Image (cartoon, rainbow, N blue to C red):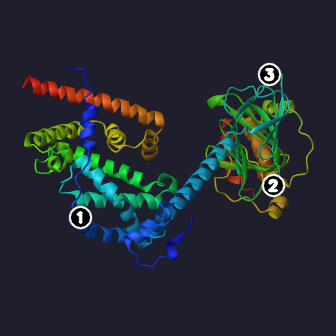
Amino acid sequence: MTNEQPSKSALASLGGPLAVADAAARERRSREILPQLRQLVRGIPARRQRKMWQRRAVVAGGVIASCALAASVWLMRVRDTDPFEVEQGPAAQSDERHGYATAADASAILRTLRGAQVAVSPSTRLSAISSDPHHELLQLAAGSVRVRVPKLGTGATFAVQTPDAIVTVHGTVFSVTVVGAGAISQTCVAVSEGLVSVERAGKRALVGAGEQLNCQAKVVSAPAATPALPPAVAPTPSVSATPLPRDHRPASGQRPPSASAARATDASLAAQNRLLAAALQAERVGQFYDARSQLLELLGRYPDSPLRTEAERSLARVSRKLP
Amino acid sequence: MAAPAQTLPATATNAVVSSSLDDAAIVQGLGAGQEWAADALYERVHDVVEQTLRRVLGPGDQELTDLVQEVFERLIVTLSEERLDHATKLRGWAAAVATHVGVDVLRARVRRRRLFSSHDGWAENLSVAGGSLENRLEARAEVERVRRVLARMPADQVETLILHDVLGHSLEEVAKLARATHAAVQSRLTRGRQELDRRLNLERSARGRS
C-alpha cells in the first residue's frame, strides 16, 4: 500500500465542470414534477393540522400518564404510612413492618389513622394488617389492648384479630386479651361501652357493654394492666347484645335483636348466659353438684329460655357424672 | 420580511415568483399550502438539485427525473414541518438533501451489485476529459472507481466529503446543513479523506498486482 493521497484528485474529478444539461430534458422534467409538487403543497395545511393534533394527543397522554404516576406514588406513600401514632409510651419496638410491641415493664397508648385509641399492655405484640381508611384491622399476637373507637361511618369497620378470633367493633370501648400462644391461645373480650362482635371458629357472638367473653378468672385480670384511656367524647353505643359462652354462640348470620327489643331482654339473657356459663365452668372443674344446681336454676327461672335445650342436655350429662 | 402569499396571482410565472421572493417567503408560502410556493421553490433550487445528483450519480442517470422529484418532495415535506432557521439558504439545503438522496441511491445500487452502468454517459459529459478517446476513457474509469469506493464508505463521511470537497460548501455551512457541530463535521471530513485514500490505494495496489 502506498502513502499517496489520491482522494484529492478523485474528489476533484467529481467536482469538475459539468456539461450543460439538455434544456429540452429539463423542461420535460419540470412539466412532470411541478404538478405533483403543487399537489403536495396543497396538502400541507391539512398535514400540519394532523401533526398538531397528534402532538397534542401525545402531550395529553403524557400529562395523564404523569398524573397517574403521581397518584400511584401518593397512594404508595399513603399505604406505607405508619398506621400508629404513639401518644404515650415508648416508640415502636417491633421488627415487624407496621408493628408495635411493648416490653414486660412498658405500656403505651397509640392512635390509629382513623383516630381509634389503643391502650397497649406490657408484653403485647400488635400490628396493623390493614390501614384502609374504611377498614382498619389490627392483629394482636400476644398481650392485651384496650380500644376506644370513634363512631364509625356507614360501611366502616374496625377489628382486632387474634390467633383464634376476630373482634369487630360496632362501637366503642373494649379490651382484647390473648392468653397463651398459637393453637392453645384464648381470647378474652371485655366491653366497657357499646357493642363488639366476636367471631371464632366460624361462629359469631355479640358482646355488649359490661360483658365479657371467654374471660376466665385469670384472663379477666389481664386488662387491669392495660393503661387507662384518656376520656373521650362519649361514643354512641350500638345495639347491646348477649354474650354467649364458648361453644354456645349462635350460628353465624343470626340476626342480632333490634335495639329496643334487645334492651328489654338484655338483663334476662345475660343472666341466663351467666347461669349456663357458670354451670359449664363448674362441670369443667368437677363440681357436678354446683353445675346441676346452676342448670336447674336456669331451667326453673327461665322455662322459655333459648338455652333450654342446651341446658337440658348439659343437665343430663352432669347428672350422669354425679357420684 | 413581507408575506406575499395572499397577494400573488395564481398565474405568476415561476421565474417572476422566484426572483421576487426571498427564501423565507417561499417557505412561508409552502407552510400555507400555496401552489405558487412549489413553483418558486422549484425555480430557486432545481439547478442545484440536478447538478448535485449528476455529480454524485452521473449526469446521464436514467433515474434523474425520479430522483429530482424525490428530492423536491423531501424538501417540501421537511420545510413545511420544520422551522425556517434550518432553511434560510434554500440552495444549500437543497444541495444537502440532494447529496443525501444521491448517496443513498449510490449505496443501494452497490448493495444490489448494479454498479455504475457503462452507458450512463458520465465520462462523456465531463468537459475536463479533453478531446482524446484515451483521456476520456481514463477519466471515465477513474470516476467509476471513485464512486464505487464512496458507495462503500460510511454515509455521513461521504456526504461531508461531497458537500465540502465536491460542492464547495464551508465547514460551517456543512455543519449547519448536517445539523452537526463544527468539530463533528471536521472529524468526518478528516476521517473520510483518510478512508478514501486508504481504499483508493488498496484498489490501485490490487490493480497493479493484476
Dot in front, 2 or 3: 3
A20 or B90, nearer to the observer? A20
Q: Label 2, on which residue?
A: A240
Which residue occupies 44% across, 72% down? B34
For the question of whether residue A231 can be seen, the reply is yes
Around disc 2, counting alpha carbons within 10 Å, would you say few (fewer than 14), some (14 to 19), or many (20 or more)? many
Q: Do the residues labelled 2 and 3 touch (CB within 8 Å)?
A: no
Picture disc at residue A104: 3
Dot in front, 3 or 1: 1
Left or right of residue A249, residue B10 in this image:
left
Assign the C terminus of chain B to one quadrant of the image. Answer: top left
**Disc on the earlier residue, 3 or 1:** 1
Picture disc at residue A23: 1
Assign the N terminus of chain B to one quadrant of the image. Answer: bottom right
Q: Which amino acid does label 1 sit on?
A: Ala
Secondary structure of the residue carrying numbered label 1 = helix
The chain to which mark 3 is attached is A
User: Residue A215: x percent and y percent?
Assistant: 77, 37
User: Residue A286: x percent and y percent?
Assistant: 72, 31
**Disc on the earlier residue, 1 or 2:** 1
Q: What residue type is labelled 2?
A: Ser
